[in-house]
Image: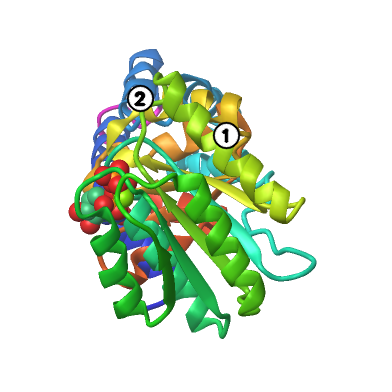
């Protein structure tokens, strides 16, 4: 399946709702009077796209309506979203010298472990060697869960005992990745609330310990956000970024929400690039982020 179709299918809930609303508004008021523009703004905000972006789109639509009388709301929205998202680099960092170390972080249940596995699958499919590190030593069955995934993906995994110091396991895993000449080390961590200072401290420790072994590690700190939690994801991102210095985002579960616009709000407010989005539960459902495909999938006028 091509990438655009994947985005299109995965974002269907959001795009269908938006397309239905926009068509309803335009049909009722083809000249887009003030009430129609208010309705358009409300529909955009309901997708969690963010007030700033919604206001910008409406302003452009209004301008086009005044200047030409002919308005393609979908095309204007696509251009605006693409512009908003296109500024940052969305590709995964690569260490000058292997291994590239990727640390995953996030609150409980956002999709860290499955994203770690999907990322490993993706990198392996590109011909890279990948090592997984099971640094969630806290949640019951977390280690087994990652082991099952490693098996499925066909890559090695470094794990310790439950209750063990996650930073020590991260260090061992990095040592192993260096010795084995692995191209990538992907570190899965326990879910933690951004409000728990001791747990955030543990994350910082993991970072420090990795740096002791490899000064430029981790090369990516990817924050995994659950796209269905809407603006709450924005609050989490802000806090994690403050303590950890997040280099990129993975926004998951966009297939399960009509509020996929949150990706735009996050990118606009935090200026942290979205690197991957999760569009389903299968191994190949984690997709490298692409602004053009995302904008096109969100505002395709044939979605309704
Ligand atoms: N539909 C859908 N489900 C997803 C996606 N990503 C993850 N999930 C599901 O979300 C659930 C939680 O995923 P995990 O990877 O275990 O989440 P986690 O962040 O590791 O959870 P903790 O380790 O407990 O903090 C699982 O049932 C996944 O299959 C996605 O993009 N789409
Ligand atoms: Mg997990």
Say which element carries label 1: helix
Relative image position of residue 271 (x, y in whole percent): 63, 33
Magenta stretch bounds: 27-31
Left or right: residue 212 versus residue 159 is: right
Q: Say whether disc 2 or disc 1 marks the residue closer to the N-terminus.
A: 1
Q: Is residue 18 magenta?
A: no
> Is ligand 1 closer than 8 angstroms to the Cβ of mark 1?
no
Relative image position of residue 14 (x, y in whole percent): 29, 44
Left or right: residue 235 versus residue 56 is: left
Q: CA distance from mark 2 to mark 1?
A: 22 Å
Q: Quadrant of the N terminus?
A: bottom left
- Look at mark 2 in the image and give the residue it sits on: 232
Left or right: residue 296 versus residue 180 is: left
How many numbered discs sit on the rendered protein?
Answer: 2
Foreground residue among 97 and 175: 175
Residue 24 visible, this orientation: yes
């Amino acid at each position: 399946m091509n990438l655009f179709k994947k985005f299109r299918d995965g974002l269907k809930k959001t795009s269908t709702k938006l397309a239905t609303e926009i068509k309803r508004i335009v049909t009722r008021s083809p000249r887009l009077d003030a009430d129609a523009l208010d309705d358009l703004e409300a529909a955009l905000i309901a997708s969690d796209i963010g007030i700033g972006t919604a206001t910008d789109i409406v302003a452009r639509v209004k301008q086009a309506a005044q200047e030409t009388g002919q308005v393609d709301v979908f095309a204007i929205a696509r251009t605006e979203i693409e512009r908003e998202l296109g500024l940052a680099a969305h590709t995964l960092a690569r260490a000058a010298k292997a291994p590239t170390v990727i640390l995953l972080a996030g609150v409980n249940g956002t999709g860290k472990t499955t994203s770690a596995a999907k990322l490993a699958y993706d990198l392996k499919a590109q011909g890279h060697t990948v090592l997984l590190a099971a640094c969630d030593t806290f949640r019951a069955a977390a280690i087994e869960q990652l082991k099952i995934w490693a098996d499925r993906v066909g890559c090695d995994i470094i794990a310790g005992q439950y209750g063990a110091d996650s930073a020590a396991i991260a260090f061992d895993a990095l040592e192993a990745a260096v010795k084995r000449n692995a191209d990538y080390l992907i570190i899965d961590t326990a879910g933690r609330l951004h409000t728990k200072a001791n747990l955030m401290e543990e994350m910082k420790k993991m970072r420090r310990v990795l740096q002791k072994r490899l000064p430029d590690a981790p090369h990516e700190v990817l924050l995994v956000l659950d796209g269905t939690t809407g603006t709450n994801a924005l609050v989490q991102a802000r806090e994690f970024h403050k303590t950890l210095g997040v280099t990129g985002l993975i926004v998951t579960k966009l297939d399960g929400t009509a509020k996929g616009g949150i990706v735009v709000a996050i990118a606009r407010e935090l200026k942290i690039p979205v690197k991957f989005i999760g569009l389903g539960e299968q191994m190949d459902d984690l997709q490298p982020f692409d602004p053009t495909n995302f904008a096109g999938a969100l505002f395709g006028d044939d979605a309704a």
